[in-house]
Image (spheres, rainbow, N blue to C red):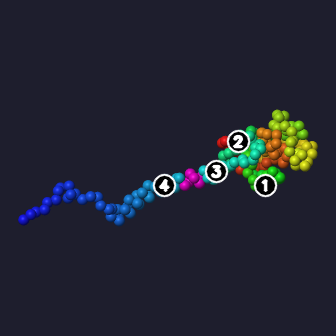
């Protein structure tokens, strides 16, 4: 008569599969912990996605040299003299289509004194940019761009940093309704 004994280690059972109710409970606990994190991630992404835009300048002759990638903060429309500002083009043909996003320097703000002649543009007596090199290309005499006035309410005088910048010297003011937000040059 022989008895068959199993070793003690084999009498312990290996962990088996989880029963269906255990899997559902574990998944439920995972969802309970993950859902708040997922909601937070989606809320941050929505806020950042609505607030910030990225823009690039693909022109060969840039009006802001060495700057071609911008971060635009659409929630910050508090623009001061000297700030980079993004705005939608209006009345800027033939260089920009209406609605195109443009980034330039707010060289003058409401109440500043603008003077434009064929030799220079000044804001409050300070030289901003020289000449009107695009007048001939626009088929207009330089004298037609002459100004000596105060920037009206809710308006900005925009310029680039190069003489060939197509800016407020040629098309006038940018108004509050055109402003997208403050821009920051990244590269």
Q: Residue at x 55, y 55 (%)?
A: 42
Where is residue 155? Give x, y as percent: 79, 46
Q: Which range is magenta?
A: 42-47
Q: Which mark is residue 67?
A: 2
> How far apart are the two marked residues, 2 and 3, measured between alpha carbons?
21 Å
The residue wearing badge 4 is: 36
The residue at the point 73 percent across, 51 percent down is: 101
On whether residue 65 falls in the magenta region, the answer is no
Indicate left or right for 123 with 87 as reference: right
Nearer to us of marks 2 and 3 is 2
Picture quarter containing residue 152?
top right
What is the CA distance from the residue labelled 4 to the residue labelled 3? 22 Å
In primary-sequence order, the first of circles 3 and 1 is 3
Dot 1: element: loop
Q: Which mark is residue 51?
A: 3
Whether pointer 2 and pointer 4 mark residues with C-beta atoms closer than 8 Å, the reply is: no
Disc 2: CA contacts within 10 A as few (<14), some (14-19) or many (>=20): some
Which one is earlier in the sequence, the residue at label 2 or at label 3? 3
Query: How far across and how far down the image is residue 44, in percent?
Result: 56, 51
Which element is circle 3 on?
Answer: helix
Callout 1 crowding tier (Cα within 10 Å): few <14, some 14–19, many ≥20: few
Label 3 crowd bin: few (<14), some (14–19), many (20+), radius 10 Å: some
Q: Quadrant of residue 33?
A: bottom left
Q: In the rendered view, does 164 fall on the left or right side of 40? A: right
Residue labelled with disc 1: 97
Nearer the viewer's eye, disc 3 or disc 1?
1
Between discs 2 and 4, the one toward the N terminus: 4
Mark in front: 2 vs 4 = 2
Residue 122's disc number: none
């Amino acid at each position: 008569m022989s008895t068959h004994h199993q070793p003690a280690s084999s009498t312990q059972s290996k962990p088996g599969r989880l029963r269906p109710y255990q899997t559902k409970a574990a998944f439920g606990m995972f969802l309970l912990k993950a859902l708040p994190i997922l909601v937070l991630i989606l809320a941050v992404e929505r806020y950042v996605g609505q607030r910030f835009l990225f823009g690039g300048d693909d022109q060969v002759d840039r009006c802001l040299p060495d700057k071609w990638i911008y971060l635009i903060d659409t929630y910050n429309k508090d623009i001061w003299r000297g700030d980079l500002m993004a705005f939608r083009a209006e009345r800027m043909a033939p260089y920009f289509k209406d609605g195109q996003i443009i980034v330039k320097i707010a060289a003058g703000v409401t109440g500043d004194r603008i003077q434009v002649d064929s030799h220079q543009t000044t804001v409050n007596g300070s030289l901003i940019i020289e000449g009107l090199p695009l007048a001939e290309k626009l088929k207009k005499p330089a004298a037609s761009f002459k100004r000596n006035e105060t920037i009206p309410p809710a308006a900005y005088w925009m310029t680039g940093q190069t003489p060939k910048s197509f800016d407020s010297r040629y098309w006038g003011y940018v108004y509050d309704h055109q402003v997208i937000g403050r821009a920051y040059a990244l590269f």
